[in-house]
Image (cartoon, grey):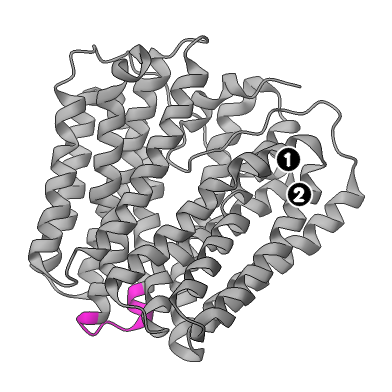
Amino acid sequence: MRLLISFGALFLSVVLLQLGLGGVVPLDALSGVELGFSAGQIGLLGSAHFIGFFIGCWWAPRLMGQVGHSRAFAALTAAGTIGILAHMLVIHPLAWAILRMASGLAVAGCYTIIEAWLQAKLTNETRGRAMGVYRVVDIVGSLGAQLLIGVLTPASYVSYNLLALLCCAALFPLVLTRSEAPPVSGAPRLRPGFAWNRSPLAAAGVVVSGITGAAFRMVGPLYALSVGLKADVIALFLAAYVLGGALVQIPVGWLADKFDRRAVLIWLSVASVLACAATVASADRGVVAIFLAAGFFGMTTFPIYSISAAHAHDFTDPSEAVELSAALMFLYAVGAIASPLIASVLIDQYGPAAMFIFISVAHILLVVFGLVRMRARPAPDDRTRYTYVPRTSFLIGRLLRRGRKRD
């Protein structure tokens, strides 16, 4: 309990940021439809978000070094708030894409600052419990952000204003905390090829994870509308995906620690293809069937990033863990930037099922590549412990490195 109170301000900021900046993702998709944006234009908004996300991951550590944690957090939160509020002032797809870059920048930048603060305050004794709470807080905030869509009216200034208020409220817990800001540590070097050198399969896995997660989160509302779901039901559709991914972490983690992680990754991708087929097949079978399919899709796709990261860490010295995590996050962003635009164009040209065909092809290629890599070298005897990895910032590796002790 003392640990929870100690980091309460940081965790409350995480929840408020998730609600404010995370809620704008599905709201933009529904608002775009309401305002007559094409599917491709709505997909562009999702891609722009991840461009901003990558810039935020790279730039935030440097900004902290120049102005400190609190000022950097305030500046980035302000950028995110402006990005939300200006939506209904300039109604144009390209303008919204620029505004979504601001919100993506704020998400990554604020998470970077929060994780830098946590890293400086944690000890070896408190790290495991604090990170457990942090993961739960992150998932709860993500669930809440999806459920908000059920009460927000698309293309309404009031809706965007409410999200901006939540974003602004995230300032209070961190900026007004009595806890002294920690000294600024250097940003990790970004070497994207480092992850490929350590494990080509892990690198491919995080790219496919980015393709899958970004397509579903950013373009999923378009699919839901096309199969007849209403806005309040779409909120539950998106929440079912997140909840499915959260529930499966423990059993998948057990499998990943007990068996060859490459085999677990391959079977998860096979199951992801089946989940795509089930989601398409459920489109005309009622709301419950659609929700169950979305939950199954989350169960099969959500853990792929963490398993890929764990597999890469098996071939990496602990001293290189932070650089590896940054490289994996970069590769995830590459997949996430391309995916929403491609998925939305496919939906526009070939119908809603095309998004899941696109995702299926990505996972089929991952299965083939995984089988090739299993022949290339044996599984390592000395393995790290599986850990659920939030996809938040380049600094997440610093928080998790103590938890990746060798078996």
Magenta stretch containing residue 38, yes or no? Answer: yes
What's the magenta region? 34-42
| Residue 296 sits in quarter | bottom right
Q: How many numbered circles are shown?
A: 2
Residue 4 image point, x, y percent: 34, 20
Residue 274 image point, x, y percent: 68, 70
| Disc 2 packing (10 Å; few <14; some 14–19; many ≥20) | many
**Of 68 and 233, the residue lying toward us:** 233
339 lies left or right of 33: right
Looking at the image, is mark 1 or mark 2 earlier in the sequence?
1
**Whether residue 194 is situated above or below residue 119 in the rendered picture:** below
Residue 198 visible in the picture: no
Q: Residue at x 18, y 64 (%)?
A: 152
**Whether residue 94 is situated above or below residue 7 in the rendered picture:** below
What amino acid is found at the position of numbered circle 2 in the picture? Val
Residue 224 image point, x, y percent: 40, 76
| Residue 62 sits in quarter | top left
**Whether residue 214 is situated above or below residue 61 in the rendered picture:** below
39 lies left or right of 168: right
Q: Quadrant of the C terminus?
A: top right
Give the structural element (helix, strand or loop) at label 2: helix
Q: Residue at x 82, y 40 (%)?
A: 259
| Alpha carbons under labels 1 and 2: distance apart | 6 Å
Residue 147 visible in the picture: yes
Q: Which residue is mark 2?
A: 264
**Whether residue 400 is situated above or below residue 107 in the rendered picture:** above
Give the structural element (helix, strand or loop) at label 1: helix
Q: Which residue is mark 1?
A: 256
| Disc 1 packing (10 Å; few <14; some 14–19; many ≥20) | many
Label pair 1/2, CB-CB below 8 angstroms: yes
Magenta stretch containing residue 15, yes or no? Answer: no
